[in-house]
Amino acid sequence: MPRVTFVNEHRTVETEPGRLLSAIAAELGIAVCRETFRGTGIGDYTCWVKGEPGATSPLTFLEKLLGARGQRRMANRTRVLGDVQVWTQAGPGNRLRTPRPIAPPPSPATDPEAPRKPIDASGSAAFPYGDPRAVGHGKREPVAAGALEAKAAKEKKAKAGAAAKATEGAAAKATEASATAEAPEGAPPRAAEKAQEPAATAPNAAAVPEAAVTAEESGGGASE
């Protein structure tokens, strides 16, 4: 009996000669049609068939019209006559409607000849940041909870204090410079400060002679 192997789906089955390839695939739950209208079975049945000469039926007129040649065939027009291998096209929806048996990944624990990934710093599914044996020991010093926040707050406070001191120093220098500019030439530093004091005592000083004159006038009148 002819033996048909669906390579992409890991399925092998023995069937009667002369059956359509699409019918054999349907029994195994394999979709070989990229449907134009979902659920209608109308679409592209392109697949690739490899076998000895005479293992499949000759190309039909419709297959030639659709561009089939060599290993490219239409599953709904090709009949199986001998042992063949079939590759289905990608993207025809759910190609395998039943659970797909997939060979387990090679495990060095059970198979000594299974290839191993070398120890390197490149990322992998097991070690996204690289194998720890290649990039380091995978350890770090413990950090107390809240230590990073406390350190950031301390640095922020220190920067604020330094900025305040710088502002005070600039203001003091500006005051000293203005006082030096207003003071008379050759006057001591205290003279400059006195020159800036409000002239609040000037009216009182002027009032003293006036009061004295008034007293003299009143005294002179009394004497007369």
Image: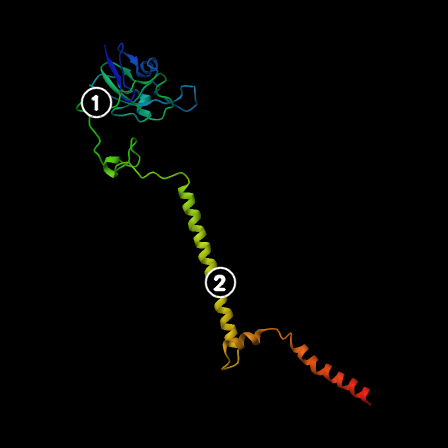
State the image quarter where residue 210 is shown. Answer: bottom right
Residue farthest along the bottom direction in this orientation: 224
Q: Is residue 182 visible?
A: no
Could you tell me which residue is drawn at 24 percent across and 19 percent down?
Answer: 85
Up the image or down, 169 lies above or below 178; here it is above
The 10 Å Cα crowd at callout 1, few under 14, some 14 to 19, many 20 or more, is few
Up the image or down, 188 lies above or below 130; here it is below
Which residue is nearer to you in this view: 65 or 93? 93
Which residue is nearer to you in this view: 187 or 40? 187
The chosen color scheme is rainbow
Up the image or down, 155 lies above or below 7; here it is below
Which residue position is annotated with label 2? 168
Q: Disc 1 on helix, strand or loop?
A: loop
The quarter of the picture where the C terminus appears is bottom right
The quarter of the picture where the N terminus appears is top left
Q: Amino acid at mark 1?
A: Ala
